[in-house]
Amino acid sequence: MRILKKGIVLLLAVTILSSALGCNSNSKETNAASSGESTSSTAKTSNSKSPVSGKKVAYILNLASSDIFQLCADQCVKTAKDLGMTCDVYFSDGDDSKWQDYINTCAAAGYSGLFVSHGGQNYSYSFLSNIVKKYPNLKIVTFDTQFKDSKGDTKPIEGVTQFFQSDADYARILLKYICEKLTPNKKPVNILKVWVGPNYLSPFDRRQIGYEEYEKKGLIHTVQTIGPTDLNNAESSMHDVMTATLAKYQPGQVDAIWVTYDAYARGCFKALQESGKNIPMVSVDICNTDIQDMLEKDSQWKACACCDFSSIGEEGIRILALEMNNEYDKIIDPKTKKKTAWVEMPASLIEQNKLKPDTTLANLKAVADSNYGNPKNFVTSEWLKDCIGY
């Protein structure tokens, strides 16, 4: 039955691609227009300055759409168009099999490049290794996708660039903010930590690296680590867990709450609001709902660490274009300034007191630090500058 089901999914995807619709009820093709109108995957674009003009690429996300991932998808399409390419977008809604089916289907359909996001670390190495072996002319860039072999060892795939957020830095800048701005006269700071791991999600594990540095330096003390009991309903589950946890502590026993993921933070924030306890909270990632919660009167949600997901979309396509033109020497990490197959987008801190009543993701750059959406963080070349301007 499972084989039959996967076969049906694959056949459906092939049918969709061949009909040039580029989308179905479980995938979405977008463009950068604010109206949200979609364009045909066969739309003709060209750019005489671009060596990848006329190529077809895809952005394939192993999650459902959201504010930030729609920003990413829209920018993928726009950047590809600027380079004379077409870009189709597929959301697998967190279904690992569907994500792999989309990749298989696009590879078989002759796409020149794939920007694939959030593959599981328990299968991505073997699956993508087989893809590049079967389709040697296909170029792949991954985002938030860790490669581990059957022994659990981290391994690269030759020719595939891995692209990440600076997850360890997310932890560092949030804890620095807590220690220096929220509790400057306290050492160690008593932290209630909201995290799931190890080996649940690779971004969470990388955030743990930055967190542990502050523990080892004696700057913070973790009073308890909690997480959702129901990962499929994380926000509501986190509300219940945080409500029960807050009831255990007297005033002064918890100085701050550090949260590894904003969906968890939303549940924590509701529990905090209901409890009436004035414990500051910081978190990783951001969306429009988070911003509104941070703007509420007397909100305990004080800061978010994040990056501009429009930049993630643009950088992913720029790296892919360089791979397609065999310019791996131009793939430079913005933090180390060195040629690499591992690129990290620098982290930004969004502080509550800098938000304005009309702040949204669309204008967040106006109140963010200089890392947020900074073109200096992008890989580039002379022809990319000619096509895009930087």
Image (cartoon, rainbow, N blue to C red):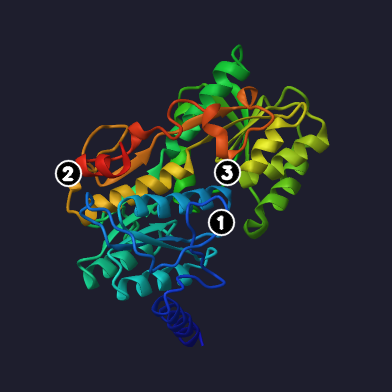
Q: Marks 1 and 3: in contact by CB < 8 Å?
A: no
Q: Which mark is residue 36?
A: 1
Between the residue at mark 3 and the residue at mark 2, the CA separation in whole angstroms equals: 34 Å
Image position of 157 (left or right of 2) = left
Q: Element under label 2?
A: helix
- Tags 3 and 2 touching, CB below 8 Å: no
Q: Which amino acid does label 1 sit on?
A: Gly
Which secondary structure lies at badge 1? loop
Real-space Cα separation, disc 2 to disc 1, in angstroms? 36 Å
Residue at image position (48%, 88%) is: 4
Using the image as rendered, state which of residue 327 and residue 39 is in the foreground.
Answer: 39
Q: From this viewpoint, is residue 211 visible?
A: no
Tell which circle, 2 or 1, labels the residue nearer the N-terminal end: 1
Q: What residue type is labelled 3?
A: Tyr
Q: Which one is nearer the viewer's eye here, 17 or 339?
A: 17
Q: Is residue 236 left or right of residue 148?
A: right
Instruction: Point out residue 172 in the picture as x, y percentages from the top left corner.
Output: 47, 29
Give me the disc on residue 261: 3
Mark 1 nearby-residue class (10 Å; few <14, some 14–19, many ≥20): few
Residue drawn 69% across the image and 29% down it: 357
Q: Position of residue 157 (x, y in %)?
A: 25, 57
So how many labels did they put on this image?
3
Name the mark nearer the viewer: 3 or 1: 1
Looking at the rendered image, the quarter that the C terminus falls into is top left
Q: Is mark 3 on a helix, strand or loop?
A: loop
